[in-house]
């Protein structure tokens, strides 16, 4: 049996990127990381709203023009027969004459994709930052409670250390790595020596730390609604990564070396056993975010496509159906495998997209009804 008290130096917390720094700044105002992500999503949506409006106007114009061009395109297909290249060139001339622009519709979509990638990178990075920070705090709680248990087991403790314990240094927030090293250098060798001299007493000390460490974890971790730990997935994942995932890295967790394995496993067992989540403490969440992502992403795309019907464009219909299947599944994939904070962003963004679609679509329809039909008629007349 290895020593379970190492008193190694605290692990270095990974630096935050610029997205993480914004999230941290907003957190100081909000006080909960889940709602911080929601607020950040709202801010991003407001910033990109003009671009969203422009995209919907451009898409509506293109839809009307495509409906007007469709009979002409069918005539081109019949005229050119097997000459696909010639037909395509003629269609491009027709689209240019009508002012049909693919780029105007694609650019905002690309911007949206870039925003998602930035958020994904930022929140995944923050997840690693938060997991290491949480672990350092749990290690401090563990070390403190080890000494408390040692005192109860009548190990030799100096009057200075007894005074420190009685003064409640840890509860006051005065605990730090330097103080820990100075206070407990006298007690750690005694506790670790019990591995060979009194295994039962050693086990009582270690086991006695688990409940108070778990209580500390429950009181200090970042939960959000039903999710026990916002920096873990809303799934069957445990509320904290196991040692292999923490060290080697996994989905949404950067590899962090330097933690003592035996000590980590004691803390992991304490947290997952006594401060775990659902299904007997094993699950961090209830799979609600993945389910919401599928439903809301599908509804958002359905509303967007419904506001710009392209009944006479079979290729667009095929592409739309494929996207309506792929996007909800892709979003749920990210939520299943990465931090719940990313899931909160995806779901919040979908809700806001639905709201903006319902708000903007009537305005766009009213604008285009008078303006674009005239453009199409003029193009048709010039032909």
Image: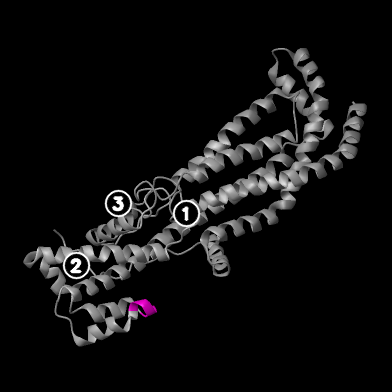
Please tell me which of labels 2 and 3 falls first in the chain: 2
Residue 75 at x, y percent in the picture: 80, 16
Q: Which residue is mark 1?
A: 124
Magenta region: 170-174
- Say which element carries label 2: helix
Q: Residue at x 57, y 48 (%)?
A: 346
Q: Is residue 173 magenta?
A: yes
Q: Is residue 196 magenta?
A: no
Quadrant containing the C terminus is top right
The part of the image, by quadrant, that contains residue 368 is top right
Q: Which residue is mark 2?
A: 205
The part of the image, by quadrant, that contains residue 101 is top right
The single residue placed furthest to the left in the displayed view is 197
In the depicted structure, whether residue 260 falls above or below residue 114: below
Quadrant containing the N terminus is bottom left
Q: Which residue is mark 3?
A: 244
Looking at the image, which is closer to me, 245 or 151? 151
Q: Residues within 10 Å of mark 2 (few under 14, many from 20)?
A: many
């Amino acid at each position: 049996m290895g020593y379970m008290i190492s008193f190694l130096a605290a692990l270095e917390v990974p630096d935050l990127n610029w997205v993480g720094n914004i999230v941290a700044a907003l957190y100081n105002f909000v006080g909960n990381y889940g709602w911080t992500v929601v607020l950040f999503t709202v801010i991003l949506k407001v910033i990109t709203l003009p671009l969203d409006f422009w995209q919907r106007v451009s898409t509506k114009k293109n839809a009307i023009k495509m409906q007007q061009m469709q009979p002409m395109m069918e005539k081109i297909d019949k005229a050119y027969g097997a000459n696909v290249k010639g037909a395509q060139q003629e269609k491009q001339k027709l689209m240019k004459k009508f002012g049909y622009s693919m780029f105007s519709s694609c650019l905002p979509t690309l911007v949206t994709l870039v925003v998602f990638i930035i958020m994904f990178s930022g929140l995944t990075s923050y997840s690693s930052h938060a997991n290491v920070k949480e672990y350092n705090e749990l290690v401090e709680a563990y070390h403190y409670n080890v000494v408390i248990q040692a005192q109860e087991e009548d190990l030799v403790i100096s009057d200075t250390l007894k005074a420190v314990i009685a003064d409640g240094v840890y509860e006051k927030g005065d605990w730090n790595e330097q103080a820990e090293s100075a206070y407990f250098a006298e007690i750690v060798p005694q506790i670790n020596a019990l591995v060979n001299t009194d295994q039962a007493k050693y086990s009582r000390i270690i086991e006695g730390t688990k409940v108070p460490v778990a209580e500390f974890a429950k009181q200090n971790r970042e939960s959000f609604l039903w999710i026990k730990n916002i920096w873990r997935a809303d799934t069957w994942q445990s509320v904290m990564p196991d040692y292999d995932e923490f060290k080697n890295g996994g989905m949404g967790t950067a590899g962090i070396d330097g933690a003592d394995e035996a000590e980590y496993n004691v803390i992991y067992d304490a947290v997952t056993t006594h401060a775990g989540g659902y299904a007997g403490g094993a699950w961090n969440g209830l799979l609600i975010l993945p389910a919401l992502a599928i439903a809301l992403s599908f509804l958002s795309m359905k509303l967007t496509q419904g506001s710009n019907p392209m009944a006479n464009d079979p290729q667009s219909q095929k592409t739309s159906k494929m996207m309506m299947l792929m996007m909800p599944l892709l979003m749920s994939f990210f939520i299943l495998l990465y931090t719940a904070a990313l899931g909160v962003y995806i779901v919040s963004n979908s809700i806001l997209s639905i709201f903006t679609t319902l708000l903007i679509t009537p305005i766009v329809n009213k604008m285009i009804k008078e303006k674009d039909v005239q453009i199409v008629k003029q193009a048709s007349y010039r032909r």
